[in-house]
Image (tube, rainbow, N blue to C red):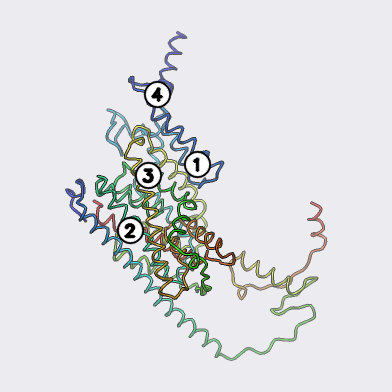
Amino acid sequence: MLSANILSMKMPLSEALAVSLIGIATVIVILAVIACLIILVSKAIRAIEAKTSSEKEETPAPAPAAPMAKGTSAGQVELINTNEKEAAVIMAIVAEKTGLSLERLSFKSIKLMEDEKKGDENK
Amino acid sequence: MIKDVLMGLWEASGFAALTADGVFLWQNLVMILVSFVLLYFAIAKKCEPLLLVPIAFGILLANLPGAGLMDDPTGLMDTSNIVEGAHWYDTGVLRLIYAGVKSSIFPCLIFLGIGCMTDFGPLLSNPVSLLLGAAAQLGIYVAFVVAILLGFTPNEAASIAIIGGADGPTAIYLTGKLASHLLGPIAVAAYSYMALIPFIQPPIMKLLTTEKERKVEMKQLRKVSKTEKIVFPVVVLVICAFILPSVAPLLGMLMLGNLFKECGVVDRLSDTAQNALMNIVTILLGLTVGATTNGATFLKLETLKIVALGLMAFCFSTVGGLLLGKLLYIITGGKVNPLIGAAGVSAVPMAARVAQNEGRKYNPTNFLLMHAMGPNVAGVIGSAVAAGFLLAMFGN
């Protein structure tokens, strides 16, 4: 910190230039340090996560699921008057809106509501 | 009797106050007209309306003759007009609210909200962006030297220079600490230039980059894990605050807000900080910052100098980011589009949008927005660090 006398007076150009150079250098150094830390921390986190996921993969796989009933898609979702493409879009929208990943969501069934659809169109 | 009542009514009116003590307060009328112009831009042209409407209305309120909304008879913040026997509750209502600016509460709360709304993902997936955010603070230091040359004191020069950081709350925070008498012109200049970024930056971008550079398509950013996003605010705060403790209030609130957003266990707090709280503080901050522009103190040659220096700071900050962008373009063998360097000024997300729009003008298939968001959010950290440095140098 500079003394109070200097702060109330006009600053010589040489001093102003020095403050400016040190200032921009400080900003660059601090942000460069943060950048290096981000790289290191990211690598460490990704390594830990990779290790954890590989350990999970090594655990014995669960018994195969029972064969799917007709009209049931992968992930045990019952599709009624809906094709898989539409169902995938709906599930993606729900995941996006709720902020939850698809692995954490459980869909029981997706059904096209014909009557309500017609009702909406009449509104 | 009726004559006395009418005379009393006239003497209490703003028309009489306009010519009080035989002095015609023409400056107040000019400022009222300025507020009308700003309201027009905010409402009709939609220029930063969330900020400009309260600021313009604050200007209007503070310049209404005789209304006394910014009166300070007990000298709470301004000792020039102390009235004998006045109490704190005689203070003008906007002056009382202004305590939130003077004490830095409002800028810090705004940073909390910004933290909740900011996604540091693009920055984490490309940490080199931080260097672009640092280079785009160049204007602050160029403006500081020029302000000193123009005869401003170091405290005033530092406050004016921070306009180049393109960050309203940071400018208000630093000016409130170093040169609060300049708060009105500095805040108005900072927010005006932030609104004018789409007009200020493109000519500089065109001037400093070639068509080939502007057409560069950058490769897709990697996906950042949730853990990285949670660790980031804590690490950044600890590092910055240990190196430069004066940066802690601003950066601390920014990173707290970001932790609210990323940790996923305090959704209610995050929601409040980025919506209700942010809106309340924006109203109070805008209104009281506008109210600091009293005609008698605002309409001076000094204000014009500040406005000019602010524009210069903005331009040089853009130049700094672009030049480092060009350097990265050369070093990486053409993998970095230099336009994203201009987004290093911290006006989020406006500067990133400008980079995106300029890039698409020359290559319609180019999508630079996410790449530009990295330097853009790095600019927020960079300007906070720059303010911390200036505060460490010139703060009491």
Tell me if label 4 and label 1 are in contact, CB under 8 Å: no
Tally of numbered discs: 4
Query: Marks 2 and 4, how far apart in space?
Result: 42 Å
Q: Is residue B76 above or below residue B255?
A: above
The first of marks 3 and 4 along the sequence is 4
Q: Amino acid at mark 4?
A: Leu
Q: Is residue B297 above or below residue B362?
A: above
The quarter holding residue B298 reads top left
Badge 2 sits on which subunit? B
Query: Residue A104, percent across and down?
Result: 60, 74
Q: Is residue A39 left or right of residue B50?
A: left
Residue corresponding to mark 1: B53
Q: Amino acid at mark 2?
A: Ala
Residue corresponding to mark 2: B386
In front: label 3 or label 1: 3
Q: Nearer the viewer, residue B328 or A117?
A: B328
Query: Residue B332, percent across and down?
Result: 43, 75
Residue corresponding to mark 3: B307
* Residue B356 visible in image: yes
Residue corresponding to mark 4: B18
Q: Is residue B86 left or right of residue A102?
A: left
Q: Is residue B116 left or right of residue B90?
A: right
In front: label 3 or label 2: 3
